Image (tube, rainbow, N blue to C red):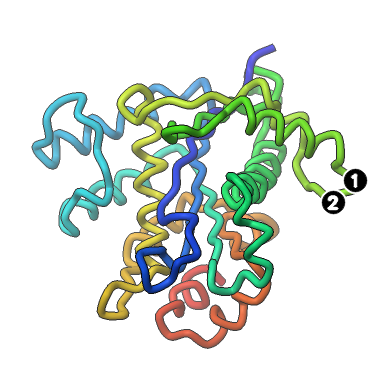
Amino acid sequence: MTPTFVVYVDESGDEGFSFGRGSSEWFVLSGVITRKADDLDTVKLIDRVRMQLGKPAKKPLHFRDLRHQQRLPFVAEIAAARLSAISVFLHKPSVKERETFQARYRFYYYAVRLLLERVSWYCCDHKTAHDAGDGSANIVFSNRSGMPYDEMRDYLQTLQELTWLQRVQVEWSVIKPDQITAYTPGKRMGLQIADAVAGSFWYAVEPSAHGFVEPRYACMLKPVVYRRRGRYEGYGLKFWPREVYSLLEKEERLAWVREEYK
């Protein structure tokens, strides 16, 4: 059997804890989910965006390199596409046991775990009798320089073996460590969509040098954000750690979460 879904994964922000010395407050990891049968047609939206923006053919689009007025049509295309998006938001200043997450790649791997839990729920929820494949997902990461993806597969294999002990909530019929790959955004266009989604949500939470956030892109993406049991929070949007919820309740700059993603 072959996978039913394809999931493109990219990030925005960094994993450092050197606040005031270059580290971001937030790290956002996003997954964009398509059905494998529709994947090629879906990711062709990148070609349409290139044409709209007058960008060279086959040159990868990087969300951060675009101006605000160029990002808007890009996000609008994503919001109208046959795909779904899930993002996890890690607020580093709220992490109490930082030394635990300063071990090699541990912070990133934990973000991957939170994301893949929700990806697996989505795929279980949306597999139909008419879909080809076995209901599993091909997970495609944006290649990080120096990242040992074999090590990540081993990490997921360990999680699978310790599912009950560690209270892991991954549906392992969907997430299979041997179906994890990594490519550059130029090789898999879907990664450029994941980059835009991660960037859109990162700009909605990460304050600029003048203390402002830009939630417009995040609000535009609402039609494709995963919702389960009538809720976005905890599913299409996951915030961590628990201490961050006090910010979500009172911070004016995060009002978009309360107002748009009730």
- Rendered residue at 68%/26% (across/down): 177
Above or below, comparing residue 252 to residue 29 in the picture: below
Residue sticking out furthest to the right: 165
- Rendered residue at 20%/48% (across/down): 65
> Which quadrant of the figure has residue 42?
top left
Q: Nearer the viewer, residue 123 or 17?
A: 17
Dot 1 crowding, Cα within 10 Å, few <14, some 14–19, many 20+: few
User: In this image, 223 relative to 114: left or right?
Assistant: left
> Which quadrant of the figure has residue 52?
top left
| Quadrant of the frame with the C terminus | bottom right
Q: Which mark is residue 201?
A: none
Residue 155 pos. (x, y %): 71, 35
Above or below, comparing residue 165 to residue 231 in the picture: above
Identity, as a three-letter code, of the amino acid under mark 2: Arg
> Which quadrant of the figure has residue 24?
bottom left
Please say if the residues under marks 1 and 2 sit with CB atoms less than 8 Å apart.
Answer: yes
Secondary structure beneath disc 2? loop
- Rendered residue at 65%/76% (across/down): 243
Q: Which mark is residue 167?
A: 2
- Figure disc tally: 2
Residue 26 pos. (x, y %): 47, 64
Q: Nearer the viewer, residue 242 or 99?
A: 99
Q: Which residue is mark 1?
A: 164
Residue sticking out furthest to the left: 54
- Rendered residue at 60%/45% (across/down): 104
Dot 2 crowding, Cα within 10 Å, few <14, some 14–19, many 20+: few
Above or below, comparing residue 161 to residue 102 in the picture: above
Secondary structure beneath disc 1? helix
